[in-house]
Each structure stands twice: as C-alpha cells, then as structure tokens.
Image (cartoon, rainbow, N blue to C red):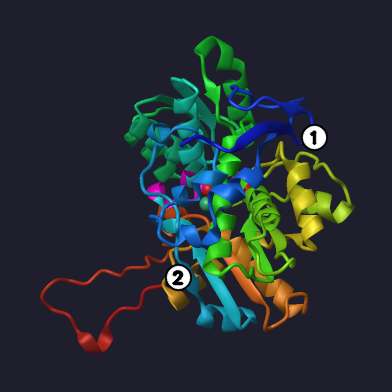
Amino acid sequence: MGSHVSHLEAAIDGTRLPARTLSTTHRGRPLWVRYDLESVGRAVSREDLANRPSTLWRYRELLPVEHDENIVSLGEGCTPLVPCPRLGAALGVENLWIKDESQLPTGSFKSRGLAMAVSMAKELGVKRLAIPTAGNAGGALAAYGARAGLETFVFLPADTPLVNRREAALFGARAFLVDGLITDCGAIVREGADRMGWFDVSTLKEPYRIEGKKTMGLELAEDFEWSLPEWVLYPTGGGTGLIGMWKAFAELGRLGWLESDALPRMVSCQSDGCAPIVRAFEAGERFAEEFEDPATLASGLRVPKAVGDFMILDAVRSSGGCARAAAEGRIPDAMARAAALEGISLCPEAAACLVVLEDLATEGSISRTDRVVVFNTGAAQKYVEVLPDDPPVVPRLASGQVDFDRLPEGS
Ligand SMILES: *Cc1c(COP(=O)(O)O)cnc(C)c1O
C-alpha cells in the first residue's frame, strides 16, 4: 500500500534528509520521520479506524512501512486502558487509568518500537541488527528478529534482570553481558557496526522506534474518544515513548482529529537513583549532563545519558508538564500497592510514576478531578529479583496436617 513518509528531519537543526535510506543520526542526534499529513488525511479518517484489527498496524497511514509484506508482527498494540479507582483514591486522584503495556509481546512496550524498527530493517534489506539494552529492548529485538528471520546481537549490562538475559538468548539472539553500563554496551555496538554489518537499533539512533512508540499516543487518543486526558505520567529512560506520544499528538492535531487543542501535560518520571532529565529540567537546561553512578531497581530507567535529552525536555516544557524523580526507596511499595489494589502487573519503572503522582497530588499540582494516565511499560514478572522475598512471601505448609486456625502469614 505505500507509505506517506515525505522525508527524514534532523531533530537538532531541521536538516531535511531523504526518506528510505539507512540513515541513523545527524550530527550525532536523532531523526524524525515526517509524513505528508494532507495525503494521510485524504487516505484515512478517524472513523475508518474503528473497523480495523486491534494492533498498532491499524494506524498504517501514520507509520513508515511501505509494503505490507515487510510488516513483522506478533499482534502488538491496542493495550487496555484500565480504570484504577482504588489505587487513585490511595494516591489522591479520582480519575486514574493505567495504560497497561505489560500485556504486549515479551511483556513490555518495547515491542511497539522494535516491531517497527525490525519491519523497517526488513524493508530496507538489513540482515543483522544490534542493540545495547537495559533489558526489555533486547528481549523485544530478539523476538522480532526471530519472527523476521534476521540475525540479532544483544548487549546487556552484567547486572540486567535475569529474565531479560534469558529471554534474549531464548529468542535466538547472540546475547552478551558487559561489565559496565548501557552506555558501555552502546560503545561496543558503535565500534562493531561497520565491521559486523550491524544496523544499530539503539534508542533514537534510528528513526523508527519512535514511530512504533508513537502508537501509544494514537491509541490513547482513540481510547479517550479524541479528547485527551489532562496528565500523562511516563517512566523515562531514553525517552522514546514520551517523545513519540508528543509527536503523535502533534500529528493528530494537524490532521484535525482531536476534539480540543488542549494537550496532556507530560510528566517525565525517573528515580532519584538516576535522574539526568529531572536535573536538567530543574536547572532550566535543554541538554542533560551524564548522571554519575546511576543505581535503581527500575532497570529501564537506568540511562545516565540520553541522546534525545533535548527532545524529551522540549516535549515536557511545551506541554506545561514537568520532570520529577521518585524516591528510590518507595518504588517496591508502589509496585506492590498497584498489584494488590487493582490486580495490575506493574513494573518498577511504572511504580516510579505512581510515587511521582502521589507527590504531585499531595502538593496540589495535580488536582483531584483531573484525568490522569500512568503508563505501565512492563510486567512485574520480568523483575523477579525486585519482588521482596525475605521473609518468604509464600510460606510453607506441611502436607496433610494443616491447622486452618493458624495459617502462617506471608510477608
Ligand atoms: C525501556 C523502558 C522504559 C523507558 O523507556 P524509554 O522510552 O526509553 O524512556 C520504561 N519502562 C520499561 C519497563 C522499559 O523497558
């Protein structure tokens, strides 16, 4: 069916680059995919979407793939928007929803971005892909690479959560543990790219993962019947999702599909164990300094330096939102609260958003009746080592002689 992509554009200085080349960055900074939105508007209306399948490919005209046969899919997208009244009441807001991305292939929203990047790699004739990853992106690349029959190389910090290490290998990637941070993994991919013939799918080093993540914003608009909520809280590592959603809202605005000009205030949430974006926001800077000695249970947030820092900060500021850090020590409790109060399998990254939400509601920045959406970017089950188990959560029973009046307490 052809794509409506008009060109690529350098985010740092607006330089126009041709579409459909294996462009990665410009002056070391990310590229935007730009569309001919008038032709998109002629090709599809928001009403047309209603009858399409429940995957992110329903937004086909706003996505970069040219030929349908290059789409690599595991059925990703269209995640539930779950109302959370009990959790909201506990945190101080009446209208809270969790957009539950934990139900996507490989248990995290990274599948949106990697579905797109791998599809484009296939379309552009790439055979080998490589990624440095804090965890979930490696699993998603490995899975989509397997689906496409492409070779994948995954570089993870040695202390990446166990499930992430295993899944990358399970899905057939050549996975390697690196003594160091994600930035050290990134250096290996950069160094080997030419020699190994890798397409570098690091966060924001190619333009297509943003387009996949953009579908979170498109879906949100559809979920809310084109009348977006007042607040979106998003756990920010490299920032692809926040940048992508903000791009989605801009494109929907240009298409005239939104009911109102008022866009959500975007809150970039980090942990105080790794908060480069928050520091830059507070200092009034457009670029973020590298965060020294980053440490957080929320491994997806352990990104000390983001190449798209200015894109995150521009989006947050133009939305009238903010960047805030959660106290690291409160993350496990927030995770447990969401799970116990609402049955949601919440990752520690999203738990950081709940801590920030509670703080913003307590200080009155978010008012009680505002509509608030928190993105749950991954499943709790991927973080077994974060789940407390001392004393053991699940006590033992001797078989055959249970005293039901004295059932042992878990933790
Ligand atoms: C990667 C990741 C994040 C951070 O996402 P960005 O779009 O890179 O900011 C948040 N949560 C989880 C679970 C992740 O895997």
Q: Which quadrant: the N terminus?
A: top left
**Quick check: can you spot residue 299?**
no
Instruction: Say which residue label 1 marks.
Output: 12
Image x and y of residue 286, in percent:
84, 45
Image x and y of residue 396, in percent:
26, 69
Image x and y of residue 365, in percent:
77, 75
Residue at point 66% right, 46% down? Answer: 38
- Can you tell me whether the CB of the residue at mark 2 lies under 8 Å from the nearest atom of ligand 1? no
Q: Disc 1 or disc 2, which is closer to the eye?
A: 1
Seen from this angle, which residue lies furthest front? 42
Which numbered tag is attached to residue 394?
none
Which numbered tag is attached to residue 339?
2
How far apart in space, not on screen, are marks 1 and 2 (Cα)? 40 Å
Nearest to the observer: residue 410 or residue 247: 247
Nearer-N-terminus badge (1/2):
1
Residue at point 53% right, 30% down? Answer: 131
Q: Residues within 10 Å of mark 1 (few under 14, many from 20)?
A: some
Image marks 1 and 2: residues in contact by CB distance under 8 Å: no
Vertical comparison of 2 with 85: above or below: above
Nearest to the observer: residue 130 or residue 69: 69
Seen from this angle, which residue lies furthest right? 284
Magenta-colored span: 105-111
Q: Quick check: 269 left or right of 65?
A: right
